[in-house]
Image (cartoon, rainbow, N blue to C red):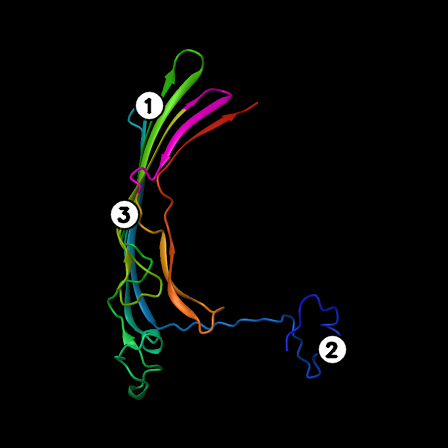
Amino acid sequence: QGLNWDDSSWNNGSFSPGGVVYTMADTMAMGFLNVGDGELSGVEVEASWRPTENWNFRGALAVSSAEYADACDPWLVQTLGFTPDLLTTDGSPFDCVDIAGNDIYTSPDTALSLSGTYTAPLGTAGWEWSARLNTRYFDKEYRVDDTLNLTYLAAHAIYNGSVSFRNDNWNITLYGNNLTDDATPRDVEYGNDNNLTPARYGFMVRPRIPREIGARLSYEF
């Protein structure tokens, strides 16, 4: 039996005659088991270029490969009922499905970020203005726990832009995020609600913020 933190007598020994002290009413334990090896490789490149006083360009590119090598997944057998490729009777520590050669989930092969900014004086009163456009691209990405590579987020690109006007005190910015109104989910996970009896299983979807147009105004004293 566990005791709540607000029980002032939890540490006086009366609740643990066997020498065991319980400190919480509800506890959770989790175990993690390595099911194989992975092969990871890739390269990242980042660059900045300022061809003139007005223009500035920046970019970053990551190209990678993340695959299961010698790997076998017991969850596919125990939870989803797949026919195992390896059996305990054959010497395997568990009945499992061979996933060697599949992509490791949540690891897109390509990620790209590009931005361009133009800045110039505005009039003769100490003002300047700037315009910026940037994009972020992600290759398709297999979802959490999908070792068979059956479900994935599609490749997508997000575009953002802004125009700013500022001097020593004022900063006025007009901005637009997700200009193409991309509706690709930010994340999709398979899960359950253990508060229900029996537990209810399904997909949890985290939607992307739709196109956003706005303005910011700030003044520094």
Q: Residue at left 74%, top 68%?
A: 8
Residue 159 at x, y = what percent? 31, 38
Q: Is residue 169 magenta?
A: yes
Q: Earlier in the sequence, mark 1 or mark 3?
A: 1
Q: Earlier in the sequence, mark 3 or mark 2?
A: 2
Q: Residue at left 32%, top 85%?
A: 88
The tag on residue 174 is: none
Q: Is residue 130 magenta?
A: no
Frontmost of labels 1 and 2 is: 2
Q: Are marks 3 and 2 in contact (CB under 8 Å)?
A: no
In this rendering, the answer to whether 102 lies above or below 12 is above
Residue assigned mark 1: 54
In the structure shown, which secondary structural element does the residue marked by tag 1 occupy? loop
Q: CA distance from mark 1 to mark 2?
A: 73 Å
Left or right: residue 101 compared with residue 129: left
Residue 11 at x, y = what percent? 72, 72
Residue assigned mark 2: 13
Residue 130 is drawn in which quadrant?
Answer: top left
Frontmost of labels 1 and 3 is: 3
Q: Residue at left 41%, top 73%?
A: 33
**Residue at the far bottom in the pictured view:** 89
Few, some or many residues within 10 Å of mark 3 (<14, 14–19, 20+):
few
The amino acid marked with disc number 3 is: His
Residue assigned mark 3: 156
Few, some or many residues within 10 Å of mark 1 (<14, 14–19, 20+):
few
In this rendering, the answer to whether 202 lies above or below 53 is below
* Bounds of the magenta segment: 165-181
